[in-house]
Amino acid sequence: MDFFTRFPFVWLILMALPWPSRCSGAPEPNLQQDPFDTARGEMVSEQITARGIKDPNVLKAMRQVPRHLFVPVGEQRHAYEDRPLSIGYGQTISQPYIVALMTELARPKPTDRALEVGTGSGYQAAVLSRLVARLFTIELLKPLADDAARRLRELGLLNVVVRNGDGYPGWPEEAPFDIILVTAAPDHVPPPLIAQLKPGGRMVIPVGHVLEAQELLLIEKDASGKTRTEHVIPVRFVPLRRGDEE
């Protein structure tokens, strides 16, 4: 007579105990894992790294920021595709490559103070804020400004200040800035933004009429206050709207 025949109650106890569903040493599933992790990693490797973006800090920020949280729910399945997406009010979120390119061109440093003109959904701000000390961002459309401020706050990005207003005049009371990024296209470079760029600073801005060719420009100011402009690539951005155009 075997042990379990002589002592059947032991078998019943053993059967009632929870048994592991995995082999010993195998990792348990992470129930909190972001379901977009894989898509975000592929976005960085296939759309950004493959096109020449090399700054490891920019690449890390692009991997960290959940782009799907910055688009309408109906567009989330497209969040990591290589294209801009509508965010309402005639505005768009830029394609991931352009966000990475503009960020890398600005050469952000942990001590930098930055200005963004055109907050939109807040995605560019979320990326840049991880790489600078302080970021001031201006959005003309109040619903977008309010939504962006909420998203950035919920993500714990507390070094970002969002203002609802006209971005053309910049933010003179917080100037000068090491970095200025403009995420909508004026037909000329706004003089107030040049004035608010610190010597040694970098501005990245698309310029051109919406129905004509636009160019992404990198403008650098030297120690004497003179600026040098580099034409980077042709782009297509929504126009930079002014306060009297709301």
Image (tube, helix red, strand yellow):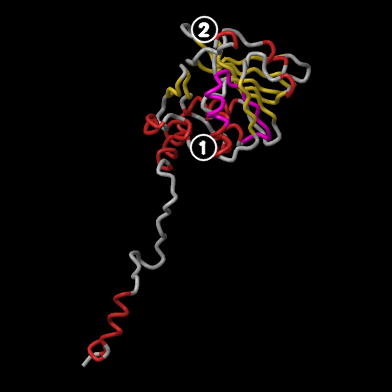
Q: Residue 65 has which mark? A: 1
Give the x, y percent position of residue 9. Answer: 28, 85
Residue closest to the eye, 239 or 214? 239
SS for callout 2:
loop
Residue 80 drawn in magenta = no
Residue closest to the eye, 145 or 98? 145
Q: Is residue 13 left or right of residue 137?
A: left
Q: Is residue 140 left or right of residue 114?
A: left
Mark 1 burial class by Cα count in 10 Å: few <14, some 14-19, many 20+: some
Identified at 43% across, 42% down, the residue is 37
* Quadrant in the picture for the C terminus: top right
Residue closest to the eye, 103 or 135? 135
Q: Please tell me in which quadrant of the rendered image residue 132 appears.
A: top right
Give the x, y percent position of residue 135. Answer: 65, 30
- Position of residue 234 relative to residue 3, above or below, is above
Residue on which the image places disc 2: 209
Q: Please tell me in which quadrant of the rendered image residue 125 appears.
A: top right
Give the x, y percent position of residue 73. Answer: 40, 32
Identified at 41% across, 27% down, the residue is 82
Q: Please tell me in which quadrant of the rendered image residue 223 appears.
A: top right
The amino acid marked with disc number 1 is Val
Identified at 45% across, 21% down, the residue is 88
Q: Residue 54 has which mark? A: none
- Position of residue 58 relative to residue 84, above or below, is below
The amino acid marked with disc number 2 is His
- Position of residue 110 relative to residue 119, above or below, is below
Mark 2 burial class by Cα count in 10 Å: few <14, some 14-19, many 20+: some
Mark 2–mark 1 Cα distance, whole angstroms, equals 31 Å
Give the x, y percent position of residue 76. Answer: 40, 33
* Quadrant in the picture for the N terminus: bottom left
Q: In the rendered structure, which segment of residues is drawn in magenta?
A: 131-149
Q: Which one is earlier in the sequence, the residue at label 2 or at label 1?
A: 1
